[in-house]
Image: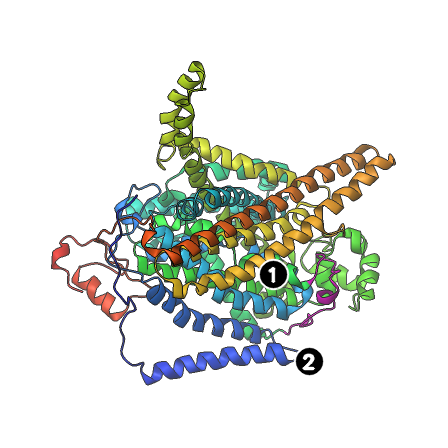
Amino acid sequence: MAEPAAPPAPDATPRRGSPAPKTVVLWTAVALVGALGWAMLALSRDEEVSAAWMVAAALGSYAIGYRFYSRFIAYRVLKADKTRATPAERLNDGVDFHPTDRRVLLGHHFAAISGAGPLVGPVLAAQMGYLPGTIWIIVGVIFAGAVQDMVVLFFSTRRNGKSLGRIAREEIGPIGGIAALVAVFAIMIILIAVLSLVVLNALAESPWGTFSTAMSIPIALFMGIYLRWIRPGRVAEVSLIGITLLLLAITAGSWIAESSWAGVFTLDKSTLVIWLVIYGFVASVLPVWMLLAPRDYLSTFMKIGTIGLLALGIVVTLPTLKMDAVTDFATRGDGPVFAGSLFPFVFITIACGALSGFHSLISSGTTPKMIQKETQVRMVGYGGMLMESSVAVMAMTAACILDPGLFFAMNAPPAVIGDTLQSASETITSWGYTLTPGQLAEAARQVEEGSILSRTGGAPTFALGVAHIFAGVIGGSGMIAFWYHFAIMFEVLFILTAIDSGTRVGRFMLQEMVGNTQPVVRAARQAAWMPPGLGNALGRAEPVLGKFRQVGWLPGVYFTSALVVLAWGYFLWVGVHDPLGGINQLFPIFGISNQLLAAVALTVCTVLLIKSGRLKWAWITAVPLAWDATVTLTASWQKVFSGDPRVGFFSQRAQAQEKIDSGQFSGQELADLQTIVTNTTVQGTLSAVFALLIVVVIADAVRVCVKAVRSPEGIELNEAPYEESKLIAPAGLFPTREEKAELEAAGLGPGGGVPEEREEIRP
């Protein structure tokens, strides 16, 4: 048990005088722009609405939320302390713990949390109309998603960068803690597998995308070495070099696709599974400064740059939202993209764009081991999540500016619309959306694809919307094919960065889990019933198990990393060979698992707020927890017990089993049905187990909270002891006037660092 931490100041909020008149005017204008955007989206009916209003509503809301709500939480509730040394400073080992420039860390964090969810989920949710999804994306991130990311990052930083599962076990207790630990690890495996599946679907048979993605790895390695040894601290310099090389790699990808080398980079999905597993292993064992941080930082420029240009393109071209504000499928629940009612499935489908449990793994994984100052949790945690939410808004916009008929043609499976232009046209027209075979053929010709029918998964739809917006600014209709393939490659880079971070976090968790078996083995070895031979074997294993707790112990690093990549590699292989389509089967369990993981994170945050004497502020995480638990447990119940085969896993299993029992199928059809039975059994069972584990976690957490309220004097926290920081670094992206003066007095640049003579420094 660590010694009690030094108590923070009664009020850690930075003191400022009355705001200047120009500041009042500025924030009033921001609020008005956001309010006007919301009014246009919500009140316009039976008339064209510009997509620019969606951008205005989002950016205005984000600005207000970050400026006021996040500042209130960081300084008034959490009382972030810039004088307290973070684990990156105290435990610096140059491998996992390493103080990282806040700008590089923001890039790494954003790249690590940004996976398939904000690109794919909102596109699929557009089936319900643009309004329900947009409201959840923006409101959800301000009051739930960004709050979760920041609070988890803060509490993990206070606990030496411990994982969410370990924090749950220490702060909630053995029952809820073990349930959380198992749930977090198992859910994380599913999440990485689905992220990888989206990458495979985009890269398969695409030499352009495969080459460009592969080249980002040596570029990142060069950047890491450049910053480490050649030109330390030259972030802007190496960023310019990296961006230039990345753009060259992207351009070269089109040359490769048309050259004799195209065959080398044209890989099928099974081959890509093997390469992704190898990449995940290597990326998880290399030092963070060598590949992980620079690669994520590099990818972030492309992510932010593309999304920023997309927002600018919307403002310039002013496309209209062609999708209805709320479609009939929202009320009927029989949508062709995914079955189920608006509640709860639109929230489950959007997932990462508003609230993502996967983020809590990064916020309690790599990021707390790299952050320089507690005061930076606001920019990295809250700000990074707002950046991801903006991606979700852009994805929703890209989907909704397309003709609705074309949207459904790309996202409905062949079983619904058929596999010919004529059948697709007739089916979609019967839904009330005009679409001719000629329009479908022209859409495929514009992007230089053989067909755009049933391009499920959301990524192609997003790419087509982006292509139309960019082509409206540069190149016209003749450039749609180029921009379409550029957007596909952009999505791959966007998603791939989450895989390496997720694998590393999984390695941390598994090392902790194996290391924590040491006391159990010791107790078993000392038991009277233990046979001497087995006891001796356990005695030899006991010290080895203890070494797994050492994050840098290489045998443990290699062993656990291999287990993690093989685990998610199995589900990835299953998804690739699933007869019903991996995305269609795995994305629902992905969304539910992700939101259940968020429930664990918000539960842990609520417990820690109450145990640390912040009872009056516990509503900050308790309210989003209540909403998230209601939504996800409802969705879990329906996926397990629904009698509709389109919704319930076990109903789908029973349907396939009936066909097998009929004896009318043989050969490949019979093999496919048997695969469906196996996969739906696994998926339905996992959905039930995950939900049960979360109920156990929440119930045990309620017990701990009640005890903490009734007997606060008996509460023990597992915070690391206070140690004064010697680092000087700004809290935000740009130093304040006071921070600039402090940096100049210490003889440091904008990135901060450790002054040679700390005693001479005056704030």
**Is residue 324 found inside the magenta-colored segment of the image?**
yes
Q: Residue furthest left?
A: 760
Residue 199 visible from this viewpoint: no
Quarter of the rendering occupied by the C terminus: bottom left
Most common secondary structure along the magenta stretch:
loop
Quarter of the rendering occupied by the N terminus: top left
Q: Position of residue 355 (x, y in %)?
A: 52, 59
Q: Dot 1 lies on which element? A: helix
Q: Which residue is drawn at 47% across and 70% down?
A: 62
Give the answer, above or below, for where 634 lies relative to 63: above
Magenta residues (range) = 320-341
Q: Residue at x 75, y 46 (%)?
A: 652
Residue holding disc 1: 347
Q: Which residue lies furthest to the front in this view?
A: 710
Q: Residue at x 29, y 41 (%)?
A: 93
- Quick one: 501 or 185, which is closer to the camera? 185
Left or right relative to 327: residue 28: left
**Type of residue at label 2?**
Glu
Q: Which residue is drawn at 20% across and 64% down?
A: 742
